[in-house]
Amino acid sequence: MTASTAPRTTVDLLELIRGRSVVALTGAGMSTDSGIPDYRGPDAPPRTPMTYQQFMGDAAFRRHYWARNHLGWRYMDGARPNSGHRAVAALERTGTVRGVITQNVDLLHTKAGSRSVIDLHGSYAQVRCTRCGHRISRMSLAERLDAANPGFAESVAAASGVEIAPDADAVLEETAHFRVVDCARCCGVLKPDIVYFGESVPRDRVDAAFAMVESADLLLVLGSSLTVMSGLRFVRRAAKLGMPIAIVNRGATRGDDLATLKLDAGCAETLTTLVT
């Protein structure tokens, strides 16, 4: 059965899931009800995501990024799980969901209580040195950036409201006065422990995600357009295995032709209905 002929109600989704072991693959649409915007949703404004090559190749670009992130990460850190995240955690507790592969960097599945989570693209809460590999918390870096840029965060916040992008990046125009800090151990370039566009997901993380998919009976895609291969490859693997695939997303996805069932709906409302 393909998505074009499948029933399109939450009841039908519940029947498809019933008695099966489910792995959830989640994208930005999962977190929009937590106030974190989507890159590609129907109502998302045009955005140009940062690439790995831009970040590593241009000191001015890194300065601009860190100035914006210095505000944006606090917003993401304060975000709270919505009813969809809580529903996924509840389904894990009952044994229906065996694990979550998330393309999001917001840690909201973990905050909601999910225990088996693969953060495919890393998380906003860690920073890594690109030279020596040393990792520190984003809070530790914030303290160093505050010391190097006294009053910066307060002055920007007082001047106007700050728009936040899905990667914890605040939308600011003027950042030339911002001072960046380097790795305290080796003076290398610090980078958020997030997989950027143009950068590969670590192989061990990909292998763990494939193993999680292959151990399940059904793949449930939640809030992802599957535009990038990072997520689409798991849908293709499930299809190759003959595994049922259910997709819940507002708008079309690149995996619709492989889906057993497709719901054009919001994640929070659909998942809440499943658990109630």
Image (spheres, grey):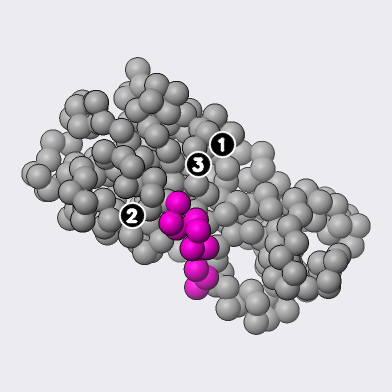
Report crowding for label 1: few under 14, some 14 to 19, many 20 or more residues within 10 A (C-alpha): some
Residue 87 belongs to the span the image colors magenta: no
Residue assigned mark 3: 117
- For the residue labelled by badge 1, is the local secondary structure a helix, a strand or a loop? helix
Name the element at disc 2. helix
Q: Look at the numbered disc 3 and give the secondary structure of its residue.
A: strand
Q: Residues within 10 Å of mark 3 (few under 14, many from 20)?
A: some
Q: Residue furthest top?
A: 276
Q: Which mark is residue 234?
A: 2
What's the residue at 41%, 61% (across, down)? 230
Q: Position of residue 156 (x, y in %)?
A: 77, 55
Q: Which residue is denoted by mark 1 in the rendering?
A: 110
The quadrant where residue 194 appears: bottom right
Q: Quadrant of residue 190?
A: bottom right
Quadrant of the drawing holding the N terminus: top left
Q: CA distance from mark 1 to mark 3?
A: 7 Å
**Which quadrant is the C terminus positioned in?**
top left
* Label pair 1/3, CB-CB below 8 angstroms: yes
Give the image quarter of residue 191.
bottom right
The front one of 230 and 180 is 230
Contact check, label 3 and label 2, Cβ < 8 Å: no
Which one is nearer the viewer's eye here, 174 or 16? 16
Of the numbered discs 2 and 1, the one sitting upstream in the chain is 1
Start-end of magenta stretch:
197-208
Seen in the picture, residue 126 relative to 78 is either above or below; the reply is below
Q: Amino acid at mark 3?
A: Val
> The residue under label 1 is which amino acid type?
Thr
Query: In screen coordinates, is 247 left or right of 65?
Result: left
**Nearer-N-terminus badge (1/3):** 1
Q: Amino acid at mark 2?
A: Phe
Look at the numbered discs 2 and 1 and tell me whether their residues touch, using CB distance below 8 Å: no
